Image (cartoon, rainbow, N blue to C red):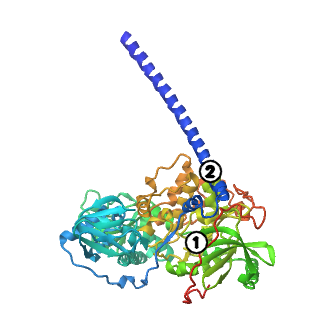
Amino acid sequence: MGTLRDLQYALQEKIEELRQRDALIDELELELDQKDELIQKLQTELDKYRAVVQPAASPPGQPELQEQQRTKRQAISAEPTALDIQDISHVTLACYSKSEQSRLLIKGAILENDFMKNLELSQILEIVDCMYPVEYSKGSCIIKEGDVSSLVYVMEEGKVEVTKDGLKLCTMGPGKVFGELAILYNCTRTATVKALTHTKLWAIDRQCFQTIMMKTGLIKHAEHMEFLRSVPSLQELQEDVLSKLADVLEETHYDEGDYIIRQGASGDTFFIISKGKVSVTQQKVANEEPVFLCTLSRGDWFGEQALKGEDVRTASVVAADDVTCLVIDRESFKQLIGGLEDVNSRVYESTEAKAKFEAEAAFFSSLDFSDFQIVNTLGVGGFGRVELVQLKSDESQTFAMKILKKQHILDTRQQGHILSEKHIMQETHCGFIVRLYRTFRDRKYLYMLMEACLGGELWTILRDRGSFDDATTRFYTACVVEALSYLHCRSIIYRDLKPENIILDQRGCAKLVDFGFAKKIGYGKKTWTFCGTPEYVAPEIILNKGHDISADYWSLGILMYELLSGSPPFSESDPMKTYNIILRGIDMVEFPKKITKNAANLIKRLCRDNPSERLGNQKNGVKDIQKHKWFEGFNWEGMRKGTLTPPIIPSVSSPLDTSNFDCFPEDSEDPPPDEDSGWDAEF
């Protein structure tokens, strides 16, 4: 008995010891949370000090101010493709003969590369076909840091050294891919690559790579659409719904003899045969041999009853040879069908609103550029500047004047984007989007006269505060949802969502600004130009699969994460590393404690890899976002009508008050005049 008592006593001691340890862990975690909170507060105060005190005390051009401005992220845009989307399936690409050994080496290098391994096998094989040979002698410079290039390489023989800012980073041997960022968009090389020995390489340029990506994607999508149109129960669906179904179809492969469907089993999956043949058999009486019914081949389908409800399979389907099926399950089907029939009803404005905007347009068309005088600078960027300007005849009326350097637009081949920005903004009348009233031009600049929102940039407020709580983030996210809903109803994609492009008016309402990457694409259509800010671009943009309005919902999830935590979920030291971690997916991201369970759930549902699975891009459209648990109790109508009090009300003393913006040095650069090519005649 004594032994049992001893064991019981020892057990109690251990239990008590564990309780004390748990209590100590709880105390330490609480202390750590308090210290984290204190660090956050101190960091916020430090940011406020840097943001407010230094600019006021430092003369224009001081290093502190330059450092501060560098923290803003620059968006990236590839030049538009020179190919006509309608003709791309007929484009013939040059193929270069190579040994089987070389083909295997190139394929292996691509499959080991963090970015290119995400491509489809058919695309990889075509890239292998199109790569051409190049050779460099010992000591030659293959890539020079700072140069602009469009080539990506696979090394077959030799050895190279990689350096950055004169410092050695690494050496590379055969079977490695390098320079891959250049096939996404026009960019400067971030490092120098020099041949240490005689080197043999295989290369492909951006135009060829993007043609392969677009061609394979479009051919596959068209094939899927053709299959879906042949199914009688799907023929009544709208084109844009069919297009989403085509995107969500998954290819599944079966070997000869595999059961695809087994009689008597429950199923929720619909199949379309894209390759091979299947045998359909039915067992009419238990314990008897199945009776052969028919053979189905390419273009035939089976299992469609499963899309309407729980389906008990009435026959067996077995692969007669190697078979590939396009598959969709009932849940995906239900999420995509319907709900889009009322899209056009929201596009039309009331007669009263139309009359108001026509009168407004008449007023601004009567003004000349000389009727305005500059008050102060609101922002600067690579494009030019944004100035607060005052109407000379009525000094109480102020506006934001965006001043664009024509030469910079030509150098970066952004003419199309600029003209698109003007046309979209002039037709946009939404309380959550900054208004464009008038444009002007001269030989050096283009001018956009816009609504002045003097509450400051959301980016500046986020920088100064570190992060926002749930309620604050909810309000700004809701403002963005309203803006995106307005645009998407008009089949306009925004493509550059981030805190830098959200501005507050004097009431504290958030509005989208900067429509340089916005584009009207049409219902059910896609576009292929790579553009956006690296941390915010969706996977389908990186992989050049073609993108639509669903890319904006991905960016909405990233915005939520950044507002709640203070930094985006995907961010690395250079763009290529950022793209690679984006391709790994949101599920690989560890969410900080400050992001609540409901917020994390919404972010993850917005940031699904497959665009057709994203909230906002399914049958109920934006309503799925508005009805999410995280928005439960939110006063959407009050926000729309302006009766809901914003979480942050900026201090704006007058129409001339620019205190909510950073200080900027005066513009000393005098750009050369544009050689009058006439491209800006529409401005």
Circle 2: residue type: Asp
Quarter where residue 384 is shown: bottom right
x, y (%) of residue 456? 67, 62
Task: Read off the residue under disc 2.
Answer: 469
Secondary structure at badge 2 equals loop
Q: Is residue 320 visible?
A: no
In the picture as drawn, the residue positioned furthest to the top comes out as 2
Could you say which disc has been placed on residue 353 in the image?
none
> Which mark is first along the chain, 2 or 1?
2
Give the CA separation, mark 1 to mark 2: 28 Å
- Residue 280 vs 470, above or below: the answer is below
The quadrant of the picture occupied by the N terminus is: top left
Mark count: 2
Does residue 206 appear to the left or right of 76 in the view shown?
left
- SS assignment at label 1: helix
Q: Please tell me which residue lies in front, 57 or 497.
A: 57
Identify which residue, 628 or 582, lies in the foreground. Answer: 582
Quadrant where the image shows the C terminus: bottom right
In the rendered image, which residue does mark 1 sit on? 488
Nearer to the camera, 678 or 645: 678
Residue at image location 45% in from the left, 58% down from the top: 572
